Amino acid sequence: MRWEELDQQPCSLSRALSVIGDRWTLLILRDCFLGIRRFDAFERRLGVTRHVLADRLKKLVEAQVLVRVAYQQKPLREEYRLTDKGKDLHPVMLALVHWGDRHMADQRGAPVLHRHKACGQLMRPVTVCSECGEAVGVRDVVVEAGPGWSEAGVLP
Protein backbone atom coordinates (compact mmCIF):
# COMPACT_ATOMS: atom_id res chain seq x y z
CA MET A 1 0.00 0.00 0.00
CA ARG A 2 1.44 3.37 -1.02
CA TRP A 3 0.98 6.45 1.16
CA GLU A 4 -0.41 8.46 -1.79
CA GLU A 5 -3.11 5.81 -2.32
CA LEU A 6 -4.48 5.62 1.22
CA ASP A 7 -7.62 7.53 0.26
CA GLN A 8 -8.46 4.82 -2.29
CA GLN A 9 -8.28 1.89 0.12
CA PRO A 10 -11.44 0.04 1.20
CA CYS A 11 -10.58 0.90 4.80
CA SER A 12 -12.01 3.86 6.73
CA LEU A 13 -8.86 4.19 8.86
CA SER A 14 -6.66 4.40 5.74
CA ARG A 15 -8.97 7.03 4.27
CA ALA A 16 -8.92 9.04 7.49
CA LEU A 17 -5.12 8.85 7.66
CA SER A 18 -4.92 10.21 4.12
CA VAL A 19 -6.31 13.47 5.55
CA ILE A 20 -5.00 13.65 9.14
CA GLY A 21 -2.16 11.14 9.15
CA ASP A 22 0.90 13.27 9.79
CA ARG A 23 2.21 15.02 12.89
CA TRP A 24 1.91 18.58 11.61
CA THR A 25 -1.71 18.07 10.61
CA LEU A 26 -2.60 16.67 14.03
CA LEU A 27 -0.84 19.57 15.77
CA ILE A 28 -2.65 22.08 13.53
CA LEU A 29 -5.93 20.42 14.47
CA ARG A 30 -4.99 20.49 18.16
CA ASP A 31 -4.44 24.23 17.86
CA CYS A 32 -7.72 24.68 15.97
CA PHE A 33 -9.55 23.07 18.88
CA LEU A 34 -7.71 25.45 21.21
CA GLY A 35 -9.04 28.41 19.23
CA ILE A 36 -6.08 29.21 16.97
CA ARG A 37 -7.25 30.40 13.55
CA ARG A 38 -4.62 32.54 11.86
CA PHE A 39 -1.62 31.44 9.81
CA ASP A 40 0.89 33.52 11.79
CA ALA A 41 -0.41 32.15 15.09
CA PHE A 42 -0.04 28.56 13.85
CA GLU A 43 3.47 29.36 12.64
CA ARG A 44 4.52 30.92 15.96
CA ARG A 45 3.05 28.15 18.12
CA LEU A 46 4.25 25.21 16.04
CA GLY A 47 7.61 26.42 14.78
CA VAL A 48 6.84 24.79 11.44
CA THR A 49 8.13 26.21 8.16
CA ARG A 50 5.72 28.42 6.23
CA HIS A 51 5.84 26.01 3.28
CA VAL A 52 4.87 22.95 5.36
CA LEU A 53 2.18 24.89 7.23
CA ALA A 54 0.67 26.26 4.01
CA ASP A 55 0.67 22.77 2.50
CA ARG A 56 -1.07 21.15 5.49
CA LEU A 57 -3.65 23.94 5.77
CA LYS A 58 -4.36 23.70 2.04
CA LYS A 59 -4.93 19.95 2.34
CA LEU A 60 -7.26 20.41 5.32
CA VAL A 61 -9.26 23.00 3.37
CA GLU A 62 -9.39 20.74 0.29
CA ALA A 63 -10.63 17.90 2.51
CA GLN A 64 -13.28 20.26 3.95
CA VAL A 65 -11.95 19.83 7.48
CA LEU A 66 -11.19 23.56 7.64
CA VAL A 67 -12.66 26.51 5.78
CA ARG A 68 -10.99 29.84 5.06
CA VAL A 69 -13.02 32.82 6.30
CA ALA A 70 -12.19 36.48 5.68
CA TYR A 71 -11.74 38.54 8.83
CA GLN A 72 -10.45 41.66 7.05
CA GLN A 73 -11.17 42.97 3.54
CA LYS A 74 -8.43 45.55 2.79
CA PRO A 75 -6.01 43.96 2.59
CA LEU A 76 -7.77 40.61 2.44
CA ARG A 77 -6.90 38.50 5.48
CA GLU A 78 -8.32 35.05 6.14
CA GLU A 79 -8.41 32.66 9.04
CA TYR A 80 -9.03 28.93 9.26
CA ARG A 81 -12.08 27.57 11.01
CA LEU A 82 -13.20 24.03 11.70
CA THR A 83 -16.09 22.81 9.57
CA ASP A 84 -18.64 20.33 10.92
CA LYS A 85 -16.45 17.63 9.36
CA GLY A 86 -13.49 19.05 11.30
CA LYS A 87 -15.45 19.29 14.54
CA ASP A 88 -16.27 15.60 14.17
CA LEU A 89 -12.56 14.97 14.85
CA HIS A 90 -12.94 16.22 18.43
CA PRO A 91 -13.49 12.75 19.97
CA VAL A 92 -10.45 11.50 18.05
CA MET A 93 -8.31 14.31 19.43
CA LEU A 94 -9.61 13.73 22.96
CA ALA A 95 -8.82 10.03 22.67
CA LEU A 96 -5.25 10.75 21.49
CA VAL A 97 -4.74 13.25 24.32
CA HIS A 98 -6.06 10.74 26.85
CA TRP A 99 -3.69 8.06 25.51
CA GLY A 100 -0.80 10.52 25.78
CA ASP A 101 -1.81 11.47 29.33
CA ARG A 102 -1.99 7.82 30.33
CA HIS A 103 1.13 6.50 28.63
CA MET A 104 3.42 9.44 27.87
CA ALA A 105 3.04 11.92 30.76
CA ASP A 106 5.91 12.45 33.17
CA GLN A 107 5.71 12.35 36.97
CA ARG A 108 3.91 15.73 37.01
CA GLY A 109 0.89 14.27 35.21
CA ALA A 110 -1.24 15.55 32.37
CA PRO A 111 -0.18 18.94 30.98
CA VAL A 112 -3.78 19.90 30.07
CA LEU A 113 -7.03 19.00 31.80
CA HIS A 114 -10.50 18.83 30.25
CA ARG A 115 -13.48 20.03 32.27
CA HIS A 116 -17.03 19.21 31.18
CA LYS A 117 -18.95 22.51 31.05
CA ALA A 118 -22.32 20.94 31.89
CA CYS A 119 -21.34 19.29 35.19
CA GLY A 120 -18.12 21.13 36.01
CA GLN A 121 -16.14 17.92 36.53
CA LEU A 122 -12.77 17.00 35.07
CA MET A 123 -13.40 14.35 32.44
CA ARG A 124 -11.75 11.72 30.31
CA PRO A 125 -13.17 10.46 27.03
CA VAL A 126 -15.10 7.19 27.17
CA THR A 127 -16.33 5.20 24.19
CA VAL A 128 -19.90 4.00 24.62
CA CYS A 129 -22.28 2.00 22.46
CA SER A 130 -24.54 4.32 20.48
CA GLU A 131 -27.46 1.92 21.01
CA CYS A 132 -27.36 0.91 24.68
CA GLY A 133 -24.98 3.47 26.23
CA GLU A 134 -22.73 0.80 27.78
CA ALA A 135 -18.97 1.48 27.85
CA VAL A 136 -17.14 -0.28 25.02
CA GLY A 137 -13.63 -1.74 25.33
CA VAL A 138 -11.37 -3.54 22.90
CA ARG A 139 -12.85 -6.99 23.70
CA ASP A 140 -16.44 -5.76 23.44
CA VAL A 141 -16.52 -5.25 19.66
CA VAL A 142 -16.75 -7.71 16.78
CA VAL A 143 -15.57 -6.41 13.40
CA GLU A 144 -17.71 -7.43 10.42
CA ALA A 145 -17.59 -6.62 6.73
CA GLY A 146 -19.84 -3.69 5.86
CA PRO A 147 -21.46 -2.59 2.60
CA GLY A 148 -18.29 -0.78 1.49
CA TRP A 149 -15.98 -3.72 2.04
CA SER A 150 -14.35 -5.54 -0.85
CA GLU A 151 -12.00 -8.49 -1.17
CA ALA A 152 -9.12 -5.97 -1.26
CA GLY A 153 -10.05 -4.89 2.28
CA VAL A 154 -8.02 -5.55 5.42
CA LEU A 155 -10.39 -7.82 7.35
CA PRO A 156 -8.91 -11.17 8.33
Image: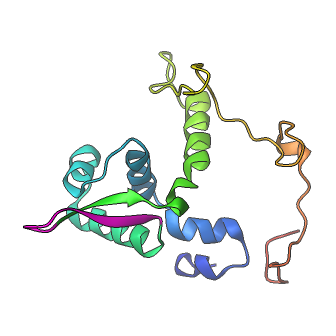
Left or right of 3 in this view: 140? right
Quadrant where the image shows the N terminus: bottom right
What coloring was used for the rendering? rainbow
Quadrant where the image shows the C terminus: bottom right
Compare residues 118 and 17 and report the one nearer the observer.
118
Left or right of 78 in this view: 122? right
Q: Which residues are magenta?
A: 65-76
Compare residues 33 and 151 and report the one nearer the observer.
33
What residue lies at 33% left-to-right and 60% top-to-bottom?
A: 80
Q: Is residue 19 above or below residue 121?
A: below
Residue 57 placement: quadrant: bottom left
What residue lies at 54% left-to-right and 63% top-to-bottom?
A: 85
Spot occupied by residue 70 in the image (x, y as percentages of width and height):
24, 65
Direction top: furthest residue: 108
Left or right of 14 in this view: 87? left
Spot occupied by residue 45 in the image (x, y as percentages of width and height):
26, 44
Count of marks placed on residues: 0
Q: Is residue 99 above or below residue 155?
A: above
Spot occupied by residue 152 in the image (x, y as percentages of width and height):
79, 83
